[in-house]
Amino acid sequence: MDDATVEAVGKLTEALETIERARGHLYSFHQLTGGADFELGEAADLLEAAGHAEIARRLRTELVGRNVLPGRWTFQIVEEYDDGYYERVRAEERSVRDELLQGRRHVFESELKESRRTRGAEGHEARP
């Protein structure tokens, strides 16, 4: 396969890897927001125990269990991302690799490794 094709598919794979990282941040957002919701509930409980029943009621009504986007909790955002954008990018990246590189992954990186390693030196082996 030619260098231009390998470079182009490598860039597509790099984009997918960046999307994987973004997805991880989305899951962090999901878990952090969920944890914060429980903390808000605990804060309301503590405020009520400290004699601030009206403030506790307001927090429970206005904040605890609140949608982060209209009609959505974070798990719904994650599911929509996974089922839509993320799955589409993964499928297209795989399709392009199958079509142009016979399904081989990380061809660009493999060629880069070969050009940068020191043949015969310990820790520079081509394969395990």
Image (cartoon, rainbow, N blue to C red):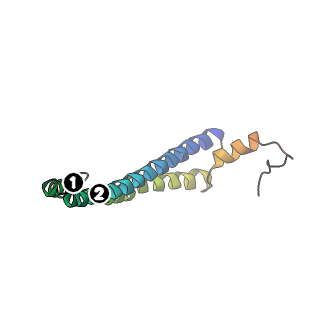
Give the x, y percent position of residue 78.
36, 57
- Label disc, if present, on residue 91 of the rendered structure: none
Mark 2 — residue?
A: 37
Measuring 50% from the left and 51% from the top, which residue is drawn there? 93
**Left or right: 114 in relation to 120:** left
Measuring 21% from the left and 52% from the top, which residue is drawn there? 70
> Which residue extends farthest left?
54
Mark 1 — residue?
A: 63
Tell me, yes or no, if residue 73 can be seen here.
Answer: no
**Left or right: 115 in relation to 107:** right
First in residue order: circle 1 vs circle 2: 2
Mark 1–mark 2 contact, CB under 8 Å? Answer: yes
* Dot 2: element: helix
Give the x, y percent position of residue 77.
32, 55
Give the x, y percent position of residue 17.
52, 48
* Dot 1: element: loop
Please state which amino acid type lies under the numbered disc 2.
Asp
Q: What is the count of numbered marks?
A: 2
> Dot 2, crowdedness within 10 Å: few (<14), some or many (≥20)?
some
